[in-house]
């Protein structure tokens, strides 16, 4: 793909660095973003909706620079790349973070970190466990997701403990939501999730019964975006038909992605912010869970 949009020299004051003085006083960071996209439709139609709004990208970059502190500019570059790849039109991205005032201790003109990342459909996966060592099981499941070829995990929520909903009497759950982007087809991703469940002795004899591990594909692609997949196939329901009814799903999802959106019915007017949906739900059965073990 030869088409690209280049945004150079986005500058702001940030507080990223390992040293206390860097976190206290801050310094100037500059960021270059190169986005590879198919721009033919934009070129032929002259419509902003057919391309990437680079003003929005610049705003997102500044928000990351001025936002919460990271020790490493490698991490800053990574989260900026993730933000840019939320635009479905972006096939891949290169992010260069410049730290010209870095405390190197020797004469220099610039320090740069450059990362290149490939895009894909954005996905949300719900995790749950209420048998055995729940925390250990979910930690292992997140590791398995991170190791899955074709899936890049970009965020994982905090753990919540939840009362069971439906089904027979059973112990409370630990739940979480993992976000990522994938080059796998929906059916391939779902099959991989089922394999991870099977590796943790998941059985399906009782509907909504206790389980060692539950991995649900909540949605595939950004709602309303070019890569969104909708399916009413009983073997692959997308988006998940009950996600919008479940506080134990939406609470950790909003934690992992405060700006998340979810399609709750057909049509553009059926796409709602997860935070708004959650505001209408009873969250009394959802409470903070333990800290994650090392993922």
Image: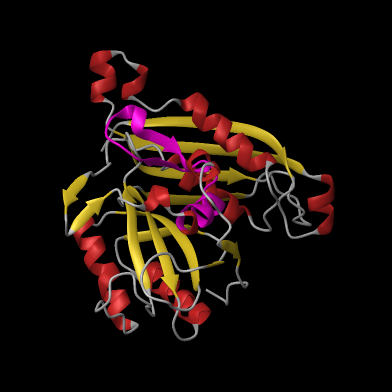
Residue at left offset 20%, top offset 56% = 236
Towards the viewer: 8 or 276? 276
Coordinates of residue 186 in the picture (x, y in percent): 23, 55
Judge whether residue 120 can be spotted in this image. no
Towards the viewer: 64 or 161? 161
Asked whether 49 falls inside the magenta stretch, the response is: no
Span shown in magenta: 249-275
**Farthest residue, direction top:** 46
Residue at left offset 35%, top offset 82% = 200
Residue at left offset 53%, top offset 37% = 32
Judge whether residue 251 can be spotted in this image. yes
Coordinates of residue 8 in the picture (x, y in percent): 53, 31
Residue at left offset 29%, top offset 20% = 42
The correct choice, above or below, for 167 with respect to 48 in the image is below
The correct choice, above or below, for 242 with respect to 211 in the image is above
When asked about the image quadrant of residue 206, the answer is bottom left
The correct choice, above or below, for 209 with respect to 24 in the image is below
Asked whether 267 falls inside the magenta stretch, the response is: yes
Q: Quadrant of the N terminus?
A: top left
Would you say 70 lies left or right of 122 here?
A: right
């Amino acid at each position: 793909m030869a088409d690209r949009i280049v945004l150079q020299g986005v500058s702001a004051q940030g507080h990223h660095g390992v040293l206390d003085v860097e976190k206290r006083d801050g310094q100037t960071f500059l960021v270059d973003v190169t986005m590879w996209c198919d721009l033919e439709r934009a070129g032929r139609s002259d419509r902003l909706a057919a391309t990437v709004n680079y003003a929005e990208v610049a705003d997102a970059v500044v928000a990351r620079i001025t936002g919460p502190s990271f020790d490493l500019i490698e991490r800053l570059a990574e989260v900026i790349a993730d933000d840019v790849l939320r635009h479905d039109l972006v096939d891949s991205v290169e992010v260069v973070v410049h730290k010209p005032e870095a405390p190197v201790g020797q004469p220099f003109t610039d320090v740069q970190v450059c990362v290149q990342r490939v895009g894909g459909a954005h996905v949300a996966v719900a995790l749950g466990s209420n048998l055995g060592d729940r925390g250990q099981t979910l930690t292992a499941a997140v590791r398995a997701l991170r190791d899955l070829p074709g899936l890049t995990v970009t965020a994982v929520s905090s753990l919540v403990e939840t009362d069971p909903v439906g089904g027979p009497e059973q112990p409370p759950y630990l739940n979480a939501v993992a976000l990522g982007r994938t080059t796998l087809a929906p059916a391939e991703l779902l099959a991989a999730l089922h394999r991870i469940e099977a590796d943790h002795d998941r059985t399906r004899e009782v509907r909504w019964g206790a389980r060692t591990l539950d991995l649900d594909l909540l949605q595939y692609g950004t709602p309303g975006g070019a890569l969104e997949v909708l399916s009413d196939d009983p073997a692959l329901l997308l988006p998940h038909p009950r996600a919008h009814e479940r506080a134990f799903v939406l609470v950790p999802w909003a934690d992992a992605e405060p700006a998340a959106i979810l399609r709750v019915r057909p049509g553009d007017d059926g796409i709602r912010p997860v935070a708004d949906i959650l505001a209408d739900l009873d969250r009394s059965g959802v409470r903070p869970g333990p800290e994650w073990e090392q993922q």
